[in-house]
Amino acid sequence: MTDTPNETEAALTGVPATPPKDDTPKSIGDRKLKPATLMMGHGFDPALSEGSLKPPIFLTSTFVFPSAAAGKRHFEGVTGKRPGGAEGLVYSRFNGPNQEILEDRLAVWEEAEDALAFSSGMSAIATLFLSMVEPGDTIVHSGPLYAATETLIGKVLGRFGVRWLDFPAGATREEIDAVMAKAAGSGRVALIYLESPANPTNALVDVEAVVASRDAAFPNGEKPPIAIDNTFLGPLWHKPLQHGADIVVYSLTKYAGGHSDLVAGGVLGSKEHINTIRSMRNTIGTICDPNTAWMLLRSLETLELRMSRAGENAAKVCAYLRDHAKVERVGYLGFLEGTDARQADIYRRHCSGGGSTFSLYLKGGEAEAFRFLDALKIAKLAVSLGGTETLASHPAGMTHLSVPEARKAALGITDNLVRISIGVEDADDLIADFEQALDAI
Ligand SMILES: *Cc1c(COP(=O)(O)O)cnc(C)c1O
């Protein structure tokens, strides 16, 4: 016996606690308020916290029932013995006030029915997979994926008899159809998992084509859900739920957190999918902690400001870099027009901005790239992206060092490639920094 709540039943039904009441306006007349406005109050009722304007951090592992009958009523709701679901909070592995407010606010950005917060992007992705796959299932995915996601699918889930089939991120409808047909003919497809733009190639996935291909390959009965990692462009410049994806995954460590001071993840989608994933999260405890949730609430208040500024800065920096004599090529989504007709078409249909993370191919090789990186004065040498500060790294020698040579070549991870994530500094200061670093080569 344990003195924690009835874990099997409570966890497996995955019914959410009822969020605290909140009377912040969602519209004025017929004007629906924008996410940037809702981030200041949505999901939080100051009256429940002594009138505190901002949510306090709720550091508690468990929540008090007002009476034994209320406790029983709670578990009747959780276990489905009483319709209407759970009411209120019970234990902090399942949820807490800070995480619930965060989840309500995350959902706002993509008009999702519901959302979940996680301790990292990878714990979000792992919990999603564990909630959906069984031995013998296939995961169909776009490639390349974030390296740890590929490890999770290929090496970890592979140990439990889960198989995978992939298509290149930039694949055409016909190429996607071929992989989808092969997967549909080889047993149950548990999940279609996408990442767009792919890291580090920046290739965009045609989400609308994947949806059409899935619907054609699975005309009757159960269609595998389509999940997509939206860390690089979301939630400002890419909203995949609007293009037919079912589930959106985030590393909130990146743009959403935005200050390079926390690690967290998120999943957004319909109540039905979210409840399936929630029950796995309840079981294994991959929720983020209250302090991290509180920091993310602060981050979300400036999300649009930060991403807009970073996006404008990146456009200016890339325009400067593109014409520089020591630069071979700049792989920036804002430059697709006129270079790659198919990718430009996907961009026009799916994206509202080019983001602030891009690939810089210098003339030369590793020596030139290293001299450039070591000369940078403002930009810091670090992996990760989406923070207020500009970061630069060398994929071939750092994040992708262990990738086999042939695959590196296929992905365009060459020794002269530098990955850059632009922050919210002054754009002309950044250009001055890149200029002197290019001179130093
Ligand atoms: C960083 C990242 C992840 C993993 O997120 P963590 O928060 O580091 O666990 C997943 N996908 C993408 C695209 C990422 O950039």
Image (spheres, rainbow, N blue to C red):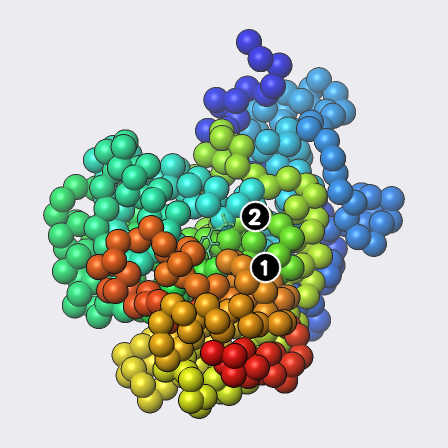
Q: Does 255 appear above or below 161?
A: below
Instruction: Out of 250 and 240, give the one closest to the viewer.
Output: 250
Q: Does 162 appear above or below 171?
A: above
Q: Is residue 258 visible?
A: yes
Whichever of labels 2 and 1 marks the residue nearer the N terminus, that label is: 1
Contact? badges 2 and 1 (CB < 8 Å): yes
Residue 437 x/y as whole percent: 54, 78
Whether the residue under disc 2 has CB within 8 Å of ligand 1: yes
Q: Does 441 appear above or below 89?
A: below
| Total numbered badges shown on the rendered structure | 2
Residue 296 x/y as whole percent: 65, 53
Screen quadrant of the N terminus: top right
The secondary structure type at the circle numbered 2 is loop
Q: Residue at x 27, y 79 (%)?
A: 342
Q: Is residue 35 visible?
A: no
Q: Does 211 appear above or below 11?
A: below
Instruction: Out of 123 and 12, give the one closest to the viewer.
Output: 123
Which residue corresponds to mark 2? 264
Q: What is the C-alpha distance between the residues marked 2 and 1?
A: 9 Å
Q: Quadrant of residue 42?
A: bottom right
Q: Quadrant of residue 409?
A: bottom left
Q: Residue at x 36, y 76 (%)?
A: 364
Q: Residue at x 31, y 85 (%)?
A: 339
Mark 1 residue crowding within 10 angstroms, few (<14) / some (14–19) / many (20+): many
Q: Residue at x 23, y 46 (%)?
A: 164
Which residue corresponds to mark 1? 256
Task: Say which amino acid is labelled 1.
Answer: Ala
Classify residue 113 as left or right of residue 191.
right
Classify residue 294 as left or right of residue 163.
right
